[in-house]
Image (cartoon, helix red, strand yellow):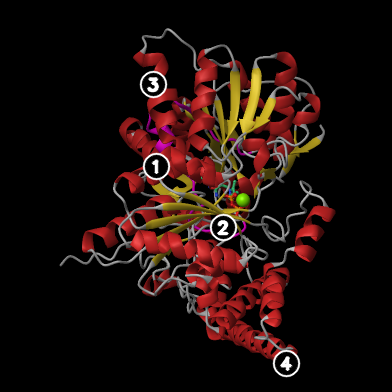
C-alpha cells in the first residue's frame, strides 16, 4: 500500500473526492443560512483527508459506520450527492426519504451503515458488521469512524475488546480533532493520544497526521489488510482539526481565531495534497481548475435536484416504522 | 412581578439553592463552556467555580457518579444533554438510582436531580427529539417532574433540591425561551400538587409540558363559542395529584388527556386508565387521549409537523367529546 504504488489516476480521484466533500459542505452551510437545509449541520471541513484516505481502500461491499459529522464519510464511500443534498433538504428523494436529515444519512447499497446522532453509536454497528463478515468468511471489512469525544463512552471499550478477542475485521478510526463539541480534549481525557489505548486491548494502535491524506492512506491500508487477513482490529488515530464550528452557527468561544487560522492556512489537507501533486507534475493549474469546476457542477446539480424534489407526502409518516414482512 | 424565561427560572433556582445548600454540585457535558446545550447553567461556574464540573461524553458515568456521590453526602444535579442520551445511562437510572433506597431497606437517601432536555425542536430528528416521561413514570422509585411555566419550573426545582429522592426533571426545549411571571424571593411548589391553569365547566384537559400552552390556546378558541374548558396541569407525574384531576372530571364529566409523548403506553394512557378506573360514573363520554404519533421523529418539516399535537387537535377533540 505504499504511496509510491498509487497511480496518478487514483491520486487525482482522491483529490477530487476531497474537493467534493469540501464544496458539498460549503454549499450545505450556505443553504442552511438560506433556510433551505434544516436542522443541525455538522461539517467535516478540514478533516477530509481522514475519510478519503481510509475509504480509498474500501470496496462497495465493505462497511463503514459514521457519526453526527457524517457527510465526508458518505461521500468518500461513494454516495450520490443528489440524494444526499435532497436528504439535507428534507425531500422524498433523499437517501432516507427525508426522514433522517444531515445527522442520519445512510446508503446501505454501498455499505454506508449510517451517520449517527448518538456519539459512539457506531461502535456496536461496526463491530457487528465485522462479525457478519467473519461469519461469512467474505473478506469484507468494517470501518468505524468516531471522534475523540466518543472514545470516552463505554461502547468504545466494550466493542474494541470484543472485536479484539474475536479477531473481527474491523478498523476503528479515531478522528481526533481535539474538541468534543465545546470542550477541548485535554480537559476531559488525560491520554490525548487515543492510539495509546490500543495496547490495553491487545491490538495495534497507530497514529497518523490526519491532515495528510497519503499518510492516512498508508496507515489505513495496513490496518485494513490486517483485518482482511483475519488478524483482527486496529485502532487508527488520525490527528485532525475541524475548520468550522461544532455545528453551523457555533460562535466558537472555546478556541481562538489564531488557532483556527493556523490550521487552515498551514495544514489544510486539500492544499497539502495539491502541493504534492504539483510537485510530482501530476496537477496543472488548468487541471486543478477543471476538477474544482466539475465538482461545483455536480453540487449545483445536487442542489437543483433537491430543490425540485417533493417533500414526503403525509402518508410517509407511518411507513417504514416496521416492514411487517414475515418470510 | 418580573418576567423571567423558563431557562432563567431553572438557573435562578439552581443558584439560589446552591447559595442555601453547599452540598449541591452540578455535572454534565459542556455545562461550563456553553452552559449545556441550552445554556441553562451558563454563569454558574463564575459564581461557584468549585461546584460545577464538565464531564467527558460519558452518560453512564455522569449518572453513576451522581448516584454514588448522592449516597455519600453530595446533592448532585446532573444534566444529560438530550433526554435521548439517557438511554446510555439507563442501568444507572433504573437499576441503581431508582432502587437503592428500597432495595437496601431505606438505609439511604438518593438526592439526585437529573435534568433532561426533551421534546421536538429545530428539526433534529429521531435521536434528539424524544419525550420519554412514561419510561420513568413506569419505574418505582423515581419522581417525575414536568414543568410547563417558568414559575413552576423554579418552584419545582427548589423542591427537587430539598428532597431526598431521585428526581427526573423534564425540560421541554421549546419552552426555554418562553417568559412568564416569577416572584422575587424564595418559594417552593410541593410535588403532587396539580395546578388548574384555567377553570371551566364543560370539558377537562389534563395537559403537561408544552401541551399546557396548547390546551390554553384551545380553551381560548372554544371560549368564543361558549365552551368552557378546564386545563389541569399535574406538574409532577410521580407523585400524581389524582384528587385534583378527579375533582375536575366530576365537575365537567368529560376529559381529554394530552402530552407530547408517543401515544402508545405514554403517560396519557396511565392517567386515562386511572380516570376510567376511579371516575367511571362521572364520565359522560369515554376518556380521550391526544398525544404524539407512534413514530420515531422524522426529520422533514413536512412530516415532523404531523407528529406532535397542536391546539387545533385539542379543539377538535373537545368538539367531538361534546358531540
Ligand atoms: C451519547 C451522546 N452524548 C452527547 C451527545 C451530544 N454531542 C453531539 S456531538 C458531541 C461531541 C462529539 O465529539 P467527538 O466525538 O470528538 O466528535 P466531533 O464532533 O469532534 O467530530 C456531543 C457531546 C450525543 N449526540 N450523544
Ligand atoms: Mg472531536
Give how far apart the Cα atoms at labels 2 and 4 are.
42 Å
Mark 3 Cβ inside 8 Å of ligand 1: no
User: Within 10 Å of the Cα at label 3, are there few (<14), some (14-19), or many (20+) other Cα atoms?
Assistant: many
Work out how far the residue at label 2 is from the one at label 1, CA to CA, in angstroms.
Answer: 38 Å
Q: Give the range drawn in magenta.
A: B122-148
Q: In this view, does B5 lie above or below A142?
A: above
Asked if the residue at label 2 sits under 8 Å from ligand 1, the reply is no
Residue highlighted by disc 2: B124
Residue B105 left/right relative to A303: left
Q: Distance between the residues labelled 4 and 3?
A: 69 Å
Residue B249 location, quadrant: top left
Q: In whole angstroms, how far apart are the C-alphas of marks 1 and 4?
A: 49 Å
Q: Which mark is residue B99?
A: 3
| Tag shown at residue A202 | 1
Mark 2 vs mark 1: tell me if same chain.
no
Residue at image coords 53%, 12%: B72
Amino acid at each position: 500500500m505504499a504511496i509510491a504504488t498509487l497511480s496518478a489516476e487514483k491520486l487525482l480521484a482522491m483529490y477530487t473526492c476531497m474537493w467534493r466533500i469540501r464544496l458539498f459542505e460549503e454549499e450545505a452551510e450556505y443553504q442552511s443560512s438560506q433556510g433551505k437545509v434544516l436542522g443541525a449541520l455538522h461539517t467535516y471541513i478540514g478533516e477530509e483527508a481522514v475519510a478519503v484516505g481510509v475509504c480509498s481502500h474500501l470496496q462497495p461491499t465493505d462497511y463503514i459506520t459514521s457519526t453526527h459529522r457524517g457527510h465526508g464519510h458518505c461521500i468518500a464511500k461513494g454516495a450520490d450527492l443528489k440524494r444526499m443534498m435532497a436528504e439535507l433538504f428534507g425531500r422524498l428523494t433523499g437517501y432516507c426519504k427525508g426522514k433522517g436529515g444531515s445527522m442520519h444519512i445512510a446508503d446501505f447499497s454501498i455499505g454506508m451503515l449510517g451517520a449517527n446522532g448518538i456519539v459512539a453509536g457506531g461502535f456496536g454497528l461496526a463491530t457487528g458488521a465485522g462479525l457478519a463478515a467473519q461469519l461469512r468468511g467474505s473478506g469484507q471489512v468494517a470501518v468505524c469512524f468516531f471522534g475523540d469525544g466518543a472514545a470516552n463512552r463505554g461502547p468504545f471499550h466494550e466493542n474494541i475488546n470484543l472485536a479484539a478477542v474475536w479477531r473481527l475485521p474491523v478498523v476503528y478510526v479515531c478522528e481526533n480533532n481535539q474538541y468534543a463539541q465545546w470542550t477541548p480534549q485535554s480537559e476531559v481525557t488525560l491520554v490525548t493520544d487515543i492510539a495509546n489505548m490500543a495496547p490495553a486491548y491487545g491490538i495495534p494502535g497507530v497514529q497518523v497526521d490526519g491532515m495528510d491524506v497519503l499518510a492516512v492512506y498508508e496507515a489505513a491500508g495496513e490496518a485494513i489488510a490486517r483485518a482482511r487477513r483475519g488478524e483482527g482490529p486496529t485502532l487508527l488515530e488520525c490527528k485532525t482539526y475541524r475548520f468550522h464550528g461544532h455545528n453551523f452557527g457555533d460562535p466558537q468561544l472555546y478556541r481562538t481565531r489564531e488557532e483556527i487560522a493556523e490550521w487552515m492556512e498551514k495544514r489544510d489537507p486539500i492544499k497539502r495534497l495539491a502541493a504534492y501533486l504539483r510537485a510530482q507534475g501530476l496537477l496543472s493549474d488548468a487541471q486543478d481548475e477543471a476538477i474544482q469546476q466539475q465538482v461545483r457542477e455536480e453540487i449545483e446539480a445536487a442542489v437543483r435536484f433537491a430543490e425540485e424534489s417533493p417533500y414526503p407526502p403525509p402518508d410517509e409518516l407511518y411507513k417504514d416504522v416496521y416492514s411487517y414482512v414475515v418470510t | 412581578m418580573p418576567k423571567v424565561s423558563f431557562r432563567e427560572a431553572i438557573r435562578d433556582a439552581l443558584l439560589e439553592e446552591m447559595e442555601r445548600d453547599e452540598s449541591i454540585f452540578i455535572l454534565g457535558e459542556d455545562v461550563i463552556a456553553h452552559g449545556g446545550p441550552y445554556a441553562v447553567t451558563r454563569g454558574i461556574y463564575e459564581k461557584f467555580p468549585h461546584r460545577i464540573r464538565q464531564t467527558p461524553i460519558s452518560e453512564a458515568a455522569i449518572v453513576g457518579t451522581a448516584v454514588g456521590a448522592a449516597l455519600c453526602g453530595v446533592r448532585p444535579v446532573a444534566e444529560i444533554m438530550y433526554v435521548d442520551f439517557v438511554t446510555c445511562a439507563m442501568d444507572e437510572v433504573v437499576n441503581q438510582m431508582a432502587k437503592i433506597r428500597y432495595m437496601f431497606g431505606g438505609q439511604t437517601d438518593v438526592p439526585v436531580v437529573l435534568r433532561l432536555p426533551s421534546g421536538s425542536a429545530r428539526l433534529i430528528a429521531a435521536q434528539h427529539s424524544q419525550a420519554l416521561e412514561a419510561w420513568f413514570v413506569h419505574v418505582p422509585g423515581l419522581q417525575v417532574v414536568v414543568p410547563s411555566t417558568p414559575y413552576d419550573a423554579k418552584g419545582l426545582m427548589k423542591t427537587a433540591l430539598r428532597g431526598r429522592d431521585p428526581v427526573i426533571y423534564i425540560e421541554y426545549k421549546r419552552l426555554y425561551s418562553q417568559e412568564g411571571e416569577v416572584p422575587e424571593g424564595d418559594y417552593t411548589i410541593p410535588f403532587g400538587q396539580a395546578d388548574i391553569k384555567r377553570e371551566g365547566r364543560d370539558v377537562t384537559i389534563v395537559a403537561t409540558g408544552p401541551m399546557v400552552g396548547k390546551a390554553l390556546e384551545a380553551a381560548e378558541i372554544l371560549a368564543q363559542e361558549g365552551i368552557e374548558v378546564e386545563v389541569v396541569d399535574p406538574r409532577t407525574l410521580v407523585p400524581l395529584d389524582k384528587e385534583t384531576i378527579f375533582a375536575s372530571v366530576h365537575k365537567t364529566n368529560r376529559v381529554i388527556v394530552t402530552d407530547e409523548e408517543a401515544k402508545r403506553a405514554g403517560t396519557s394512557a396511565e392517567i386515562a386508565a386511572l380516570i376510567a378506573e376511579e371516575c367511571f360514573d362521572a364520565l359522560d363520554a369515554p376518556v380521550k387521549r391526544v398525544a404524539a404519533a407512534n413514530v420515531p421523529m422524522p426529520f422533514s418539516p413536512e412530516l415532523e409537523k404531523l407528529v406532535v399535537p397542536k391546539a387545533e387537535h385539542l379543539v377538535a377533540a373537545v368538539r367531538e367529546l361534546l358531540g
